[in-house]
Amino acid sequence: MKKIMRYSALIAVGLAGALSACSDSTAPGALPEAPTPGSPAGSPTELVAQGETEFTATVGTTIEPGPAVRVLDENHRPVAGVSVSFGPERSKVVVTDADGIARFGPWQLDTLARVYFIEVRVAVSVQRELGVVFHARATPGPVVHFTASSGNNQVGEPSTTLPNQLHARATDIYNNPVRGLLVTFSVVSGGGIIELSTSTTDAFGLATAGLWTLGSTSPQRVSARAGDFEALFEATFCDTGHPCDLVPVDLAYVRDGAVWISGADGPRLVAHDASRPSWSPDGSRLAFFKVNANREDEAICIAAEPFSGMVCTPVDEPLEDMRVSWSPDGRTLALSGIYYGGGNSQLLFLDVATMTIRRHGTIDQSVWSASWSPDGEKTVGYTTESVFGLDLALLDPKTKELTVLERGQGDFDALTWSADGNRLAYSVWVSASGMRDVRIMNIADRASNDVLTNASDPSWRR
């Protein structure tokens, strides 16, 4: 019994010695000494969000409570009395309280539907600062305005199809587009047929119906309904004195991812999944690009009357946004990329008879999107020399004189001349509707009309 007690005492003494040695150790990797309770906090080393950093709310409303952050030192203790700046331009400064917290307060959202942000910053030194970013997605409010956006007041012959689709637009009280609203289109007067009678509003608040074939009696009206909201579209017969030739016959264009040709009896479909049509010089053939689901070029195709078939050849190395230009004899197609401000563009040639492509080399990209007039006396193209942006201008190759036809209030594209050289057709981006329209200009007086809505890439048959 005495021996057992002696060994126990020795073990106890050994443990005590070991613990004493550990307490005096200064070996590398030893844990830092814990801060003394009640000691003052150190300098800021960490800035953390208190609560959510991502918010979603309706435009014009207030997010409450708003953004809040906490400032901590290296031992994760709150630091009081620190200046914290809030806002994109540090428009508000808040001092942290005893808990190290700075609160922005209620966050009042603007009336524009978009993503807003608040940057929170704490300066640690001249060259270093801590930061946290809060985001708020302001979503549109309920529908307040429901209107006929485009396709209204068209003219046509009885029992013919109008050239433009109908678009109804839904917006909130601040005119933000409302997405996801189910809209039904129906003929309410005069007979006739409306294609694709139901549609859901898109990111621009637009619901799109199919083409409208007129009936035989006046008045001609179509109703677009969404719940308790209604917008009316009207059309007029040409025999009441309204012109019916706003859209030229045989104008090729792109709408809803397909190539169409305007006609006296309404538009004709040439090809689905197609883009950038171009008529041959004699008007007998139409060249265009076939595209995939991502609208990337896959092949160059040529179709002829009655456009029931086509011949195509793959484009193995497609250029960005390629354009087609026919040689005067109609035997060759030049394929080139549009200018976007960097490097040179490859130029390819397609032999129409054999449908084979050969590479020519590169071209100077400072000359782009130009189109010769039928008489060869002038060209029309785009210039970026104006403070307005992209301008539409005429160039006399002999005198080098540049005449601006239209200032760059929109994004112009795809120039084409009428056979008589008196008019131009081109596509333009309309920001109000979020769509491209085909515009025709009379060069003499520069008067223009948007003759096709939700359409682009016109090509005039000569």
Image (cartoon, grey):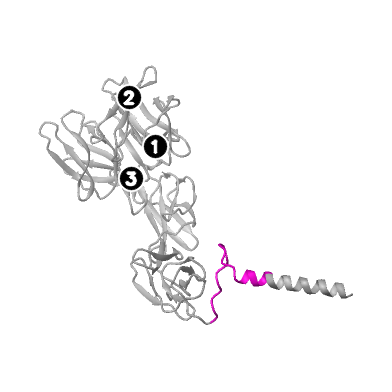
Could you tell me which quadrant the C terminus lies in?
top left
Q: Where the N terminus falls, by quadrant?
A: bottom right
Q: Residues within 10 Å of mark 2 (few under 14, many from 20)?
A: many
User: Residue 106, relative to residue 273: is it above or below?
Assistant: below
Q: Residue at x 42, y 56 (%)?
A: 205
Q: Label 3 belongs to which residue?
A: 437
**Residue 145 seen in the current view:** no
Q: Is residue 368 left or right of residue 292?
A: left
Furthest residue to the left? Answer: 399
| Amino acid beneath label 3 | Asp
In the image, residue 381 lies at what x, y percent? 22, 38
Q: Is residue 23 magenta?
A: yes
Identified by mark 1, the residue type is: Pro
The disc labelled 2 sits on which kind of residue? Leu
Total residue callouts: 3
Q: Residues within 10 Å of mark 3 (few under 14, many from 20)?
A: many
Quick one: SS at disc 1? loop
Distance from the alpha carbon under mark 1 to that under mark 3: 16 Å
Front disc: 1 or 2: 2
Residue drawn at 23 percent across, 42 percent down:
441
Please indicate whether residue 36 sits to the left or right of residue 140 in the image: right
- Judged from the image, the secondary structure of the residue bearing numbered disc 2 is strand
> Residue tagged by mark 1?
267
Residue 45 vs 388, above or below: the answer is below
Callouts 3 and 2 close, C-beta under 8 Å: no
Disc 1 versus disc 2: distance between alpha carbons? Answer: 26 Å
The segment highlighted magenta reads: 18-37
- Residue 346 rendering spot, x and y as whole percentages: 32, 29
Q: Earlier in the sequence, mark 1 or mark 3?
A: 1
Of residues 224 and 429, the one drawn nearer to the viewer in this rendering: 429
Q: Main secondary structure of the magenta part?
A: loop
- Quadrant of residue 26 within the rendered picture: bottom right
